Image (cartoon, rainbow, N blue to C red):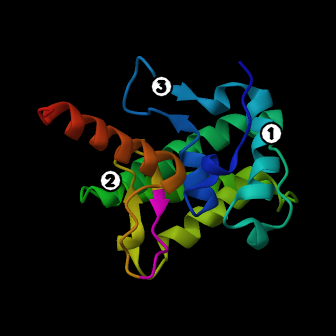
Amino acid sequence: MTFSWTPHRFSGGALALDVANSVVLRADPERRIDRFADPAVMDAFPDGANRHGAERALFGALEPVGADGRDGLVALREAIDRHFRAEVLGAGKPALMADLLDAISATLRRSGTRPHALDTATARSALMLLTQPEPERLKICPNCHWLFLDRSRNRSRAWCDMAVCGNRAKASRHYRRNREEPRP
């Protein structure tokens, strides 16, 4: 099966969140899919982010990480997910923030003269998220469990992507409601 980085895959609203969301069904070990497990898919991510990512104008044209940076990007991704997911759930801990800062620091030390590499831009995006003035805008999609930024004016966005997760939730609710109601 071929995979492509479609606009839906970049519904997190920040590069760091889109990278964290590269693990599908994270909480389900039997169905979990790590999109970065395939080096070719990881290498294609920057092109997708350049076309669809919310922060594409901030970091310039993103480039893939080298083979020597793959493990570091995955470590950064996992630290981003642990910290921000815990924050949304009200279980944030200083140790998780310290782990994230360590991963960011290690990434930036490795970056050298690669300011447009995916790992460097992801580290910078995570730093921006850490300092955002409204942390309550960070949410978890109730359908797919991806992290996303709610940039709506009234902070009422419920799903990472209305066209995918919102429609699935509404269709499921409609199905349950019609199944439970007796027919005349």
Q: Is residue 44 left or right of residue 156?
A: right
For the residues labelled 3 and 2, say whether their Cβ atoms are less than 8 Å apart: no
- The residue under label 2 is 86
Element on which disc 3 rests: loop
Q: Is residue 151 placed above or below 139 in the rendered structure?
A: below
Q: Residue at x 24, y 55 (%)?
A: 91
Q: Which residue is mark 1?
A: 44
**Residue 151 belongs to magenta span:** yes
Which of marks 2 and 1 precedes in the sequence? 1
Q: Which residues are magenta?
A: 148-153
Residue 127 lies within the magenta run: no
Q: Where residue 122 appears, x then y in whole percent?
A: 66, 57
Question: Reading the chain from its start, which is encountered first: label 1 or label 3?
Answer: 3
Residue highlighted by disc 3: 32
**Kind of residue at disc 1:** Ala
Q: Is residue 78 above or below residue 56?
A: above
Neighbor class of circle 3 (other Cα within 10 Å; few <14, some 14-19, many 20+) is few
Q: Quadrant of the N terminus?
A: top right
How far apart in space, not on screen, are marks 1 and 2 (Cα)? 29 Å
User: Is residue 3 placed above or below 80 in the rendered structure?
Assistant: above
